[in-house]
Amino acid sequence: MHTSLLRSLRCAALASAVALACTLPVHADAQAPVPAALPSIASFFGNSPFGGAVLSPDAHFLAVRLGAPGKRDSLAIVDLSNNSAKVIASYDDADVGHIRWINNERLVFTTQEKNVGLGNKRYAPGLYAINRDGQKFVELADRTGWGSGHGSRATRKVLPWHTYLLAQAGTRDSDYVYVTSPIFDTTGDVRSVDLLRLNTLTGFTQTVPRPGNVQGWMLDHKGEPRLATGFEQDTITLHYRDPESGAWRVLASYPAFGDGSKALQPLGFTPEGNLYVLARSGGRETTAVHIFDIVSGKIDPRPLVMTAGFDFDGGLIVNRDKVLGISFRTDAVSNEWFDPGMKAVQAELDKLLPATINMISVPARGETPWVLVSSYSDAIPGTYSLYNVQTKQLNKVADSRPDIKPAQMGRQQFVRYKARDGLEIPALLTLPSGGAKKNLPMVVMVHGGPYARGASWGWNSETQFLASRGYAVLEPEFRGSKGFGIKHFKAGFKQWGLAMQDDIADGVRWAVGQGIADGSRVCIAGASYGGYATLMGLVKDPDLYKCGINWIGVTDINLLYNGGWSFTNDTSDEYKAYGMPEMVGDPVKDAAQFQATSPLRQAARITQPVLLAYGGVDRRVPINHGTEFRNAVMKTNKNVEWVEYPEEGHGWALEKNNIDFWGRVERFLDKHIGAGAAKP
């Protein structure tokens, strides 16, 4: 049986933070006809009216983030005994952000600003605590400004702006929560991170002793700090805290950069006290889950979990008693259960919802039979439901993007093709719904990183927007992409603009050869590294690409070294010194290669139409990447469109800018490879 809480939630969203709760009867969903009109840009890129759903530890209540037209996102609580919903926190000048239960009665949450771009922001996320009935509200961390810090702390008894929730939720059975606080050096870089135990009622904190400089922390199954990760120059060190003495000792060290062949990535502690890690053992091509022996300091060489053809990418699903299963990503993200009861629940849900992948969130100490389900597919952005494992009742809560009609969306498939040197390249191929599937105009979308995993099968607003406009979309996992084994990853070292670029071009030729794409109507597009590859594609394969779309893209490798760009703000100097020379190239030894593979230096070779978009306060790829390239390419190419979003950083945070940018993309593609293109 499918029922809905959506009307109850809408009622709560439209009410004030102190208004009465609304109770509405459960009803069956109506199946609306699919409209003939194309879905709007806002339906793909507008702010979602619903998100952040999380069950209380006892599963009696559901906390959600609600939005409504003209209103800020608020925090609402749903009582699952009667489906009533009530807003308990909202602001006139901020939106509710991340939500977390810390016990059955109390929650903490952060705020965000959806109406102001990065360049105009003068506050941090803050941290707040409140009871589920709206009582005992406490401001725990300041959000009013980057510089308010210690003065605010002294006068208002709140922690400084640079206070953040630890990623792990802990045991969620007390009024305490762990938060982190970075320690800055004189240059503004983060040199270490403190861990504090925070009382959410009083605001008092206790600092956990550090084993030197620490960048990350991990709790054990009892919610106690047990592991600290140090990072110095080119080495990562794992420190273990003895449960009896509290003393720290070194567990392991490994190189911070390079191919990751010696890396040990902690996944978590089991209730039995074992440490699960990700490692590549015994000469294996891919990473797998192993047990790390705390006493001996050695890895059990026998893998516990492997994902054939993929590096393991996921985590443990643990309650207070045992490991229930794992969440992982191969071609898509899904759960695999060890617990027989949860395995049966998954089978029941998959039978009820056969068109989606159904991710189950298990409460920490469920006293009711409810579990939270998040369902998605390539054509469905995401639907939240509650499932009663006893009655088998499925209650729909809300859709993350309610205006999306799955029948209008494209269908996605995971494919593989051979590069010119024989290396197999994984890719996602999305084809528009309806009509012919041959000789389509195509956009090849290049992911950023580049030493990262691209998209996996599932909802992607960018891809589906393009498919809804009639374009096939190819997303190659070129060499250097993570997730497909060490050979595939390492093959991308020092291959910017070279073999990495060829992999993308070979994907286009494969799609043309398969009859999928019209070889005369292909555009290349991407952000960050994807923007770099877009421009290099226009340089290197001018006959292959009709046009290019680059947003926030690198335009010269030397600017990575000299222009303030870094993958992470607190490791930029280390990465430049130890990581980039091996993975990207050395600016002295590889100077000739940098020149030949620089879109900025090769700008005169680009004759195709180009759309360029940059953020004015981007600290990852500063805007001079864009302005210098624009000035260079326009000397010989007048078919250049330029847009700057002055308040944006590395990507578009504001709804208005997302809608504006993708409107520009739609018009640009239509003009050059779409229905509006001039016929030969």
Image (cartoon, rainbow, N blue to C red):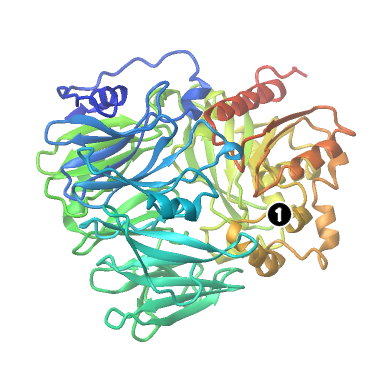
Residue at the spot of label 1: 564
- The image shows residue 79 at horizontal and vertical percentages of 17, 35
**What residue is rendered at 42% in x and 25% in y?**
404
* The residue positioned farthest toward the left in the image shown: 391
- The answer, for residue 514, to whether it is visible in the render is yes
The residue nearer to you, when weighing 176 against 384, is 176
The residue nearer to you, when weighing 625 against 104, is 104
Q: Amino acid at mark 1?
A: Gly
**What residue is rendered at 83% in x and 66% in y?**
588
- The image shows residue 184 at horizontal and vertical percentages of 56, 63
* The residue positioned farthest toward the bottom in the image shown: 296
- Please identify the quadrant where the C terminus is shown: top right
Asked which secondary structure carries label 1, the reply is loop
The residue nearer to you, when weighing 62 against 498, is 62
* The residue positioned farthest toward the top in the image shown: 36
Is 83 drawn above or below residue 160 in the view shown?
A: above
Q: Tell me the quarter of the picture where residue 327 sits.
A: bottom left
- The answer, for residue 264, to whether it is visible in the render is no
Q: Residues within 10 Å of mark 1 (few under 14, many from 20)?
A: some
**What residue is rendered at 27% in x and 68% in y?**
270
**What residue is rendered at 86% in x and 60% in y?**
592
* The residue positioned farthest toward the front in the image shown: 155
516 to the left or right of 90: right
391 to the left or right of 559: left
Is 638 drawn above or below residue 142 in the view shown?
A: above
- The image shows residue 497 at horizontal and vertical percentages of 74, 52
10 to the left or right of 341: right
Is 533 drawn above or below residue 499 in the view shown?
A: above
- Please identify the quadrant where the N terminus is shown: top left
The residue nearer to you, when weighing 100 against 520, is 100
